[in-house]
Structure formats: C-alpha cells, structure tokens
Image: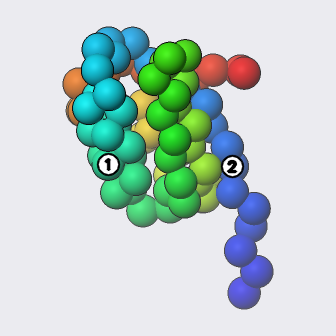
C-alpha cells in the first residue's frame, strides 16, 4: 500500500511564554494518530505539523493545542 504524502499544516498560536510551552505542545500534538512530525517555532509562534489528512483534520489539531492551554488558528503561511 502506498502512503499518501503528508499534509503540512501551519498553525499560529497565542499564549507562549516559555520554552517549556513548546515542549508541551509538541508532546500533545505528537501523540495524535496520523501526526508524523510537529515543530513549534517559539519566536514566531508557529506550529508546523506534518500529518495524514485522512486520519487527523486541521480542526482536531487546533483542539489539541487548545487542550494544551494555547489558542491557535490555521495559517495560510
């Protein structure tokens, strides 16, 4: 079976105050089935997520970031 290429979703987040926030978000989002990688950019408040769009939606990613305690929204860039 051929695996479809991952979808890259970029979220803009609010509420970062320290580097441990980055670890918390990466850990929470990284646990989701279908997420291949997650990278949080502290300085720009960007969250880059490579995921299988058939397993996890952008809305689900936003909800998990919210559960971790941070507000996020999908970004076009």
Mark 1 nearby-residue class (10 Å; few <14, some 14–19, many ≥20): few
Marks 2 and 1 close (CB-CB < 8 Å): no
Q: Which residue is mark 2?
A: 7
Q: Nearer the viewer, residue 18 or 33?
A: 18
In the image, residue 38 above or below residue 43: below
Left or right, residue 74 beside residue 63:
right
Q: Quadrant of the N terminus?
A: bottom right
Residue 35 image position (x, y, % from top left): 50, 56
User: Is residue 58 something one can see in this rendering?
Assistant: no
Q: Nearer the viewer, mark 2 or mark 1?
A: 1
**Which residue is painted at 26% across and 32% down in the image?**
20
Q: Which residue is mark 1?
A: 27
Q: Earlier in the sequence, mark 2 or mark 1?
A: 2
Label 2 and label 1: CA atoms lie apart by 19 Å
User: Which residue lies most toward the bottom here?
Assistant: 1
Left or right, residue 8 beside residue 39:
right
Q: Nearer the viewer, residue 59 or 77?
A: 77
In the image, residue 40 above or below residue 37: above
**Which residue is painted at 29% across and 14% down in the image?**
17
Q: Which mark is residue 16?
A: none
Q: Nearer the viewer, residue 17 or 57?
A: 17
Tag 1's secondary structure?
helix
Residue 66 image position (x, y, % from top left): 30, 27
Mark 2 nearby-residue class (10 Å; few <14, some 14–19, many ≥20): some
User: Is residue 22 something one can see in this rendering?
Assistant: yes
How many labels were placed on the picture? 2
Left or right, residue 24 beside residue 30:
left
Q: Residue 42 is drawn in which quadrant? A: top left
Q: Nearer the viewer, residue 65 or 42?
A: 42
**Which residue is painted at 23% across and 24% down in the image?**
69
């Amino acid at each position: 079976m051929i695996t479809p290429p991952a979808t890259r979703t970029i979220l803009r987040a609010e509420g970062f105050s320290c580097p441990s926030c980055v670890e918390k978000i990466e850990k929470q989002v990284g646990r989701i089935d279908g997420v291949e990688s997650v990278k949080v950019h502290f300085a720009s408040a960007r969250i880059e997520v490579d995921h299988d769009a058939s397993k996890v939606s952008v809305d689900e990613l936003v909800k998990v970031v919210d559960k971790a305690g941070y507000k996020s929204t999908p970004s076009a860039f």
